[in-house]
Image (cartoon, rainbow, N blue to C red):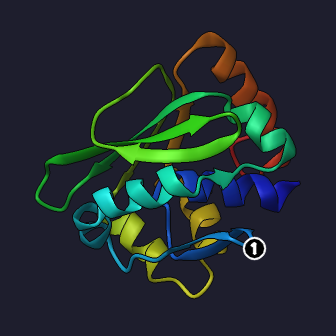
Amino acid sequence: MKKSLIFILALLLISTSLVIAQTADCSNNISFSNLQDLITNLDSLNTQLNTCPINLPGAIGSLVGNGNIETSIKLNDETTSVFYVIISNKQISGISTQSTGKVTYLVSTSEETLNSILNSQDQLASFSSAYTSDQITIKGNTFINRIKLFFSRWFVPSNKN
């Protein structure tokens, strides 16, 4: 459960270089080497996710719920890039530069941290390390989501508990 939660949080944050098989006739090959690559290919990624959404397993789908996860990334030039990961019916169904519904969670990090995760041989460990060292923050945007996130932290290895 611990690794599943970290994995899905990493996936929601970076939509990173993971090959995610959905069914025999539906699979996504999502791969980015850096943030600029992700931003450049955002429309293509959104099309892939609209065509073949990524299923969120069991309790993770219930934890996340429906809505948008606002992802803010502080760029090296001191500006901020914001995009929204769209969750619907326990699936990641899109990604956009504009919110298409209620924002459920707020995720923030830096371009340097994200690029480090994307280029890591062990992205899960890199994400976990960045999260526990406060290089990545995840906050619930509503009272209920803050409570869900609070209780989920017991399942995430962290020095924040």
Give the left or right position of residue 151, taking residue 115 as reference.
right
Task: Indicate the quadrant containing the C terminus: top left, top right, bottom left or bottom right.
Answer: top right
Of 60 and 21, nearer the camera is: 21
Q: Tell me where residue 60 sits by quadrant.
A: top right
Residue designated by label 1: 24
Give the left or right position of residue 48, taking residue 112 as reference.
right
Give the left or right position of residue 44, taking residue 139 as reference.
left
Find residue 77 and report its horizontal and vertical position in percent.
11, 59
Find residue 36 and report its horizontal and vertical position in percent.
24, 69
Q: Amino acid at mark 1?
A: Ala
- Residue at 65% across / 21% down in the picture? 145
- Residue at 59% across / 58% down in the picture? 10
Give the left or right position of residue 105, taking residue 25 as reference.
left
Find residue 67 and report its horizontal and vertical position in percent.
54, 27
- Residue at 32% across / 66% down in the picture? 38
Vertical position of residue 61 compared to residue 15: above or below: above
Of 46 and 37, nearer the camera is: 46
Vertical position of residue 26 compared to residue 54: above or below: below
State whether residue 153 appears in this view: no
State whether residue 6 appears in this view: yes
Task: Indicate the quadrant containing the N terminus: top left, top right, bottom left or bottom right.
Answer: bottom right
Most extreme residue toward the bottom, as rendered?
A: 121
